[in-house]
Amino acid sequence: MNVEINFLEKQEKKKIAPFMFSLLAILLISLAIGVTWYQTYLLTHELNEKSAYVEKLEAVISENQVEIADQQRLQQLQQAVENLQRSSLPTVDLYEEIIGLIPNLNQLQSYENGDSTQLIVDVTFPHLIAVSSYVSSLLDVKYVQDVQLTGVSKVELGYQATLTVLFDEEVLKKELNPNE
């Protein structure tokens, strides 16, 4: 009989399960870290794209707001111009019509706008009948309410008359502004 004597210590069987479990845990943790990093990368990239898009939109909105503000200012200015045109007198047309009634343009000495419903005209006439004729022709104009002969003085070439012409502002605007 052979007896086998082994003086070497018996080694226990290596347990591979803890090693595999540790390796599997490391792999799973690495996989989780990798997936998390990849998702972070994707989300960061998407966030950067969205931020750039938002910045573009903000720039467009800002430009549109500037354009809208400019359009509103333009509309306000147009409204103000329209209001001024409605409220202002047709001074040039009034001047041309009043002066057109004078027989000779050289007779006009001065023309002055008083307040909004009167004007003062200094005209030289050859005789007093011409003064009364001019006053009569002024009174025939629809928008003239009254003509006051403020002063008459004898000058070398005849008579210098100062006339204050009072007119109805609304009728004047209707007569001389055919656009309204």
Image (cartoon, rainbow, N blue to C red):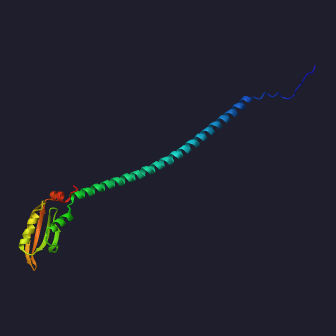
- Locate residue 46: give its quadrant: top right
Q: Is residue 32 left or right of residue 165?
A: right
- The residue closer to the viewer here, 46 or 138, is 138
Residue for point 61% across, 38% down: 35
Q: Residue furthest bottom?
A: 156
Q: Is residue 2 left or right of residue 45?
A: right
Picture quarter with the C terminus: bottom left
Where residue 125 appears, as percent x and y from the top left, is 10, 74
Where residue 98 appears, as percent x and y from the top left, is 15, 66
- The residue closer to the viewer here, 78 or 5, is 78
- Locate residue 156: give its quadrant: bottom left
- Locate residue 17: give its quadrant: top right
**In the picture shown, does residue 169 fall above or below 12?**
below
Residue for point 21% across, 65% down: 92
Q: Residue furthest front?
A: 103
Residue for point 18% across, 58% down: 173
Q: Is residue 26 left or right of residue 59?
A: right
Q: Residue furthest top?
A: 1
Where residue 131 appears, as percent x and y from the top left, is 8, 71
Q: How many marks?
A: 0
- The residue closer to the viewer here, 117 or 27, is 117
Q: Is residue 64 left or right of residue 12?
A: left
Picture quarter with the N terminus: top right
**In the picture shown, does residue 73 fall above or below 130?**
above
Where residue 81 appears, as percent x and y from the top left, is 27, 58
